[in-house]
Image: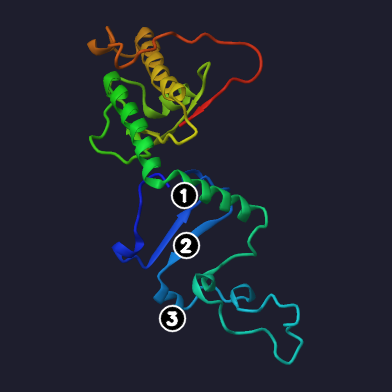
Amino acid sequence: GAGGELDVKRIGCAWLAASVHKWLLGPYGAALVYADSELCLHAPPLEHHDRNREGADDVECLAMTPSGYPTDFYPGARRFDGGGRPSYIVMPMLRVSLELIHRLGVAQISAALYECTSRIASRAAALGFKVPVLHAACIVGLTPAPWMPTAEQLVRRLGELPRPVLVADRFGTIRVSPYLYNTDADLDALIDGLDTILRESAARGGSSLPRLLSSPSPSVCPSRRKPTPRKGPPRSRSRL
């Protein structure tokens, strides 16, 4: 849903599997599998049970009757169904999610997310992070410079800020993956949070800030207010 459009016919794809949560906005507990039409005719299923046999859900088809359970598989990709019966709660939710993705358009989603990740990459680079020249539309990695706290420390500290920002540490790099529900305020919270943490670290003598942070450009990091802790109900969080 976020990485871009994929034409299975053009690339000659035989199998394609996709998790449905996050990028496809679906619930946990399901996955989608595409199978080439030729495979649907001849490839043997990995699982053999009554749920992928055509007509097995017929109340008249019981093991105790002379006919027994049918042996023919359902036509199409349904012959490869596995696990238990589809959830009557999950499936309708997934359908609505896929309809939304289709209505918004995969190309439009990718373009919007690339704008977000490019903005994050540019502003993080201005703070001194190493960012890849090329990155996916939906994910960008921010590698701390040697003078910075580690990615693990930065991720943990971001979650402790007055406005927490939830990102992940992946092998020494901060994984940032915004999606359609993230706002400009969320992106600002991430960059401003990183800036605050780096300045705190420098103030404690943990590192020396490069010159590029001594007089930030308003066009790169427009918001420089140091957030103040608030008391009261739970704070809003930005998940990226």
Pick whichever, 9 or 185, lies toward us.
9
Sequence order check: which comes first, mark 3 or mark 2?
Answer: 2
Q: Residue at x 40, y 70 (%)?
A: 36
Q: Which residue is mark 1?
A: 102
Give the labeled residue for mark 3: 42
Amino acid marked by disc 3: His
**Image quarter of the C terminus:** top left
Q: Residue at x 52, y 8 (%)?
A: 228
Q: For marks 3 and 1, give the one nearer the viewer.
A: 1
Mark 1 residue type = His
Taking 98 as reference, is 210 left or right? left
**How far across and how far down the image is residue 165, in percent?**
48, 25
128 relative position to 79: left or right: left
Q: Residues within 10 Å of mark 2 (few under 14, many from 20)?
A: few
Report how far apart the C-alphas of labels 2 and 1 lie in the structure.
17 Å
Q: Secondary structure at mark 3?
A: helix
Q: Earlier in the sequence, mark 3 or mark 1?
A: 3
Residue corresponding to mark 2: 33
Mark 2 lies on a secondary structure that is: strand
Coordinates of residue 163 in the picture (x, y in percent) = 52, 19
Furthest-bottom residue in view?
66
Residue 13 image point, x, y percent: 34, 65
Please, what is the three-letter code of the amino acid marked with disc 2?
A: Val
Classed neighbour count for the residue bearing mark 1: other residues with Cα under 10 Å, few (<14), some (14–19), many (≥20): few
**Vertical arrangement, residue 4 with respect to residue 219, above or below:** below
The image shows residue 6 at horizontal and vertical percentages of 35, 55
Disc 3 to disc 1: CB gap under 8 Å: no
On the rendered structure, is 233 left or right of 149?
A: right
Q: CA distance from mark 3 to mark 2?
A: 17 Å
Q: Residue at x 36, y 45 (%)?
A: 107
Residue located 45% across and 55% down the image:
18
Mark number for residue 226?
none
